[in-house]
Each structure stands twice: as C-alpha cells, then as structure tokens.
Amino acid sequence: MNIQTITGTTSLYALLGSPVSHSLSPTIHNTSFAHLGLDAAYVVFDVNTQNIGEAVAGIRALGIRGFNVTMPCKQAVIEHLDALSPAAQLIGAVNTVSVEGDTLTGHNTDGAGMIRALSEAGAVLSDARVVILGAGGAARAIAAQAALDGAAQVHLAKRPGATFATAQADVTRLAEATGVDMALVDFSDEGALADAVSNADILINATPIGMGDGSTEIPVNVDWLTSEHYVADAVYHPRRTALLAAAEGVGATPVEGLNMLVWQGLIAEEIWLGEQLADSGRAISATPVLAALAI
Ligand code: NAP
C-alpha cells in the first residue's frame, strides 16, 4: 500500500509474533486489500509470549479490526481471547483472530488453507483417504481440518522417538473428537508407510523435507504414487519441490505450498471481511497475491 493512501478512516490489520520482519503476510494482505479496493492496511508487530497479553489488550483498545498470530504465540494467545472456532479448539492453536465488538474469536486457517489449495486443484475431501507426512503444527492443523471437512481416513506419519507417544495421544483425541478414522504411522516403517501412501487419495508433505534452493530430497518413494494421487507440499521454498516435480512425473496432481500459504491468509480475510465483501459483491482472489509473491 502506498503510504499516501493511509488516512484517518483506514482499517488496520496486524500480525503478532516473533520474528516477523521477513513474513510474507504483509505482502499477501496488502496486495489483496488493494485488489479488493479496500481502505485497509496490514502491519507486523514483534511480540513474544511474555507480552502477548498486553499486545491483545492494545489491539482491543486501538480498534484494530482483526489480526494474525504466528510463532511463538499461537498457543499463548488463547487465554487472552473470548472464544475459539471449532478448528482452533481441535488444533489447540490460533493463527487468526476476528474482532466483533468486544469479542475476540480465535480461528486456525492453516489447515483450511491447505484444503482450499487442494480443492482448487480438483481434490474432493469428502470421503477421501489422506496421508500427512509429519505430526507437527502444520500436520495437525491440516489433519483436524481434513477431518472436519469429511475425510474418511487421516493417517499422519512421524519418526519414532520420545515424542511419538504424545503425538499418538493427540491423534487419538482428534479421532475421538471428530469421529474420523485417524492413526499415527511410524515414518521409519517402510511397509506401513507404503501401504498408507499407496491406498491414499491425497498425500501431503508437512515436514521440512525438500525445503531450500536446489534440494532434491523427497520424503517418500515415488513408486508408491500414481496418476490418481493429489500430492501437496506445505514447503513453499522452493515453490516446486522435488516431491511435487516427481509426483507430476508420474501423472499425479501437484499442489504447491505457496497456494496453502496464500489461502491461509485469504481465508483469514474471509473471516474478517465476510459480510462486507458479500454486501459489496467483491471477491477475494489468490491470483494477484501469487503474482505479487513471485517466488
Ligand atoms: P514442526 O511443528 O516443526 O513439525 C515438523 C514435522 O516434520 C515433525 O513432525 C517432524 O518430525 C517432521 N520432520 C522433520 N524432519 C523430518 C525428517 N527428516 N524426516 C521425517 N520427518 C521429519 O513444523 P511445522 O510448523 O509443522 O512445519 C512443517 C513444514 O510446513 C515446514 O517446512 C514449514 O515451513 C511448512 N509450513 C508451510 C505452511 C504454508 O502455509 N505453506 C504453513 C505452516 C508450515 P518429528 O516429530 O519426528 O520431529
């Protein structure tokens, strides 16, 4: 946004977290706001878990219209909010907060961003069998949203180790809460992973494997993939990971992590601006945002 266009009526949106100086969120939101012709601006504030409460109190006092939350505050922010969406409640982490009067509601759009990117590519979540590589923050957000959106089966794959049992308990809790068939597979058990991936409709990499310029790392054996698979990567740098290139090579449908990133932001805008956009007939679009990111 050009500084001259900020006036006394401009609505302010923000990102809280640390570090935030290299975040792509300001580009995503300011590009989208400009495309929508909105009198709105998005800024970042470096906030940590010690001062997140004061920051949220400041947001209430200043009339900021909505905000995102990133590491390390995604859990710590919860006690300062008034309500949680079903996804945020299930995931136990918040990345988007809506402000309606005095009520701050926490949402989590990370999983929804991935599901929207998959849907845009033609994948159907209803009754789908989904395999997610990794069991960290992104994997759990995607797993919870996939379950909420009607997946028949969600398997996560995690390396064995000290945190396996805790992750297994979390997956069991998610399965009980959603009624969806969910399981945690041992990433190092090649037979079990091959079975899960071969029988899946959708494979999602939510590990950092493949991240970084020139990386040729692929998290699974490409022989397990067919042209029937949708293969998505949460990694967005590089934009076309080695996994996505290999998936495309066997005729599978690739879905880029950058689309997940853009959609988690644009779904936050749908939450903040929903009624305003519906009334004005304006529509959110990922196209100008993807062009502006140009990575
Ligand atoms: P995280 O919480 O640290 O979780 C990472 C997961 O990957 C863990 O389960 C970890 O396994 C697993 N992992 C790491 N290295 C591995 C390896 N060599 N082999 C097998 N598993 C491995 O991270 P996160 O926040 O979920 O992020 C995961 C990836 O998604 C990152 O690349 C991040 O940049 C990306 N991401 C993208 C978006 C987007 O919008 N596109 C959003 C969020 C995250 P253990 O549990 O065994 O340690």
Image (cartoon, grey):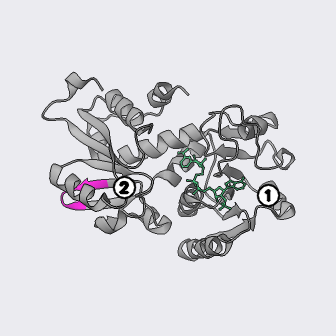
Inspect the image, locate mark 2, and give the three-letter code of the amino acid beneath it: Asn
Measured along the vertical axis of the image, is residue 81 above or below residue 230? below
Query: Marks 1 and 2, how far apart in space?
Result: 42 Å
Q: Residue 291, how many percent across, how many down?
A: 49, 25
Q: Residues within 10 Å of mark 1 (few under 14, many from 20)?
A: some
Question: Which label sits on residue 239?
Answer: none
At 70% from the left and 68% from the top, the residue drawn is: 184
Q: Say which of 256 and 212 sits in front.
A: 212
Inspect the image, locate mark 1, and give the three-letter code of the amino acid beneath it: Asn
Residue designated by label 1:
199
| Quarter of the rendering occupied by the N terminus | top left
Q: Is residue 30 magenta?
A: no
Asked where in the image residue 85 lies, by quadrant, the reply is: bottom left
Residue designated by label 2:
48
Q: Say which of 214 and 169 sits in front.
A: 214
Q: Say which of 54 and 15 sits in front.
A: 54
At 60% from the left and 36% from the top, the residue drawn is: 237
CB of mark 1 within 8 Å of CB of mark 2?
Answer: no
Q: Answer whether residue 284 is visible to the viewer in this image.
A: no
Q: Residues within 10 Å of mark 2 (few under 14, many from 20)?
A: some
Whichever of labels 1 and 2 marks the residue nearer the N terminus, that label is 2
Residues in magenta, as a range? 98-103
Q: Is residue 137 left or right of residue 9?
A: right
